[in-house]
Amino acid sequence: MSEAPIDGGNRQADFERKIVAPQQLGERVASLARPLVFTNGCFDVLHRGHVSLLAEARSLGTALIVALNSDASVRRLGKGDGRPVNTLADRLAIIAALQAVTLVTWFDEDTPLQRILDCRPDILVKGGDWPVDRIVGNREVGGWGGRVFSLPFIHQTSTTALLEKIRRL
């Protein structure tokens, strides 16, 4: 039995349906089971620390929304020359492909506050380098009865350190 040839046309991978434009976030979130968990970041060069954080964040609720900094937003953070390494479109696809992630969106502003307000999560999560009182959205999420967590790092990895190691090779 012969198989049909693979067509490299305009097919969309299933995980790409998880990518949601900011203006459609509220509508898509409305159909998700609660409790809803939200986190954000650049997620430029994905590493074990990232996926561990996302898996742990998801375990705190039923659905996980991840908001990525746009390319311009990453550049404004001053993470170094040539950052982001991966474009927003590539970063969105990679994060969407992760099992722990329910939906992924983005923000062009310096902070994800508007995306937090758009989806009103029950739980807000950042990595352990963020004290809870400095997490953007802490006051808002707490104000509607949600919880905010700064999850300790399980693996001491960073994109900046990884890129420095690559450059030394």
Image (cartoon, helix red, strand yellow):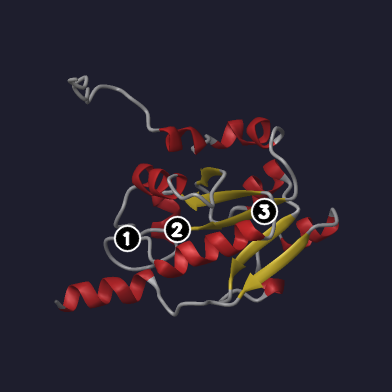
Foreground of the two, 59 or 40:
59
Disc 3 packing (10 Å; few <14; some 14–19; many ≥20): many
Q: Which residue is mark 2?
A: 42
Whole-percent x and y of residue 155? Answer: 46, 77
Foreground of the two, 5 or 50:
5
Residue 16, image quadrant? top left
Q: Which residue is mark 3?
A: 37
Looking at marks 3 and 2 on the same chain, the residue that comes earlier in the sequence is marked by 3
Whole-percent x and y of residue 167? Answer: 19, 73
Looking at marks 2 and 1 on the same chain, the residue that comes earlier in the sequence is marked by 2
Q: Amino acid at mark 3?
A: Val
Disc 3/disc 2 C-alpha distance (Å): 17 Å
| Picture residue at 35% right of the left edge, 72% below the top | 160
Disc 1 packing (10 Å; few <14; some 14–19; many ≥20): some
In the image: residue 7, left or right of residue 138 = left
Mark nearer the viewer, 1 or 3 = 3
Foreground of the two, 27 or 139:
27
Residue 13, image quadrant? top left
| Quarter of the picture holding the N terminus | top left
* Secondary element at image label 3: strand
In the image: residue 130, left or right of residue 166 = right
| Picture residue at 72% right of the left edge, 41% below the top | 33
Q: Are marks 1 and 3 in contact (CB under 8 Å)?
A: no
Q: Are marks 2 and 1 in contact (CB under 8 Å)?
A: yes
Disc 2/disc 1 C-alpha distance (Å): 10 Å
Whole-percent x and y of residue 122? Answer: 76, 53
Q: Amino acid at mark 1?
A: Arg
Mark nearer the viewer, 3 or 2 = 3
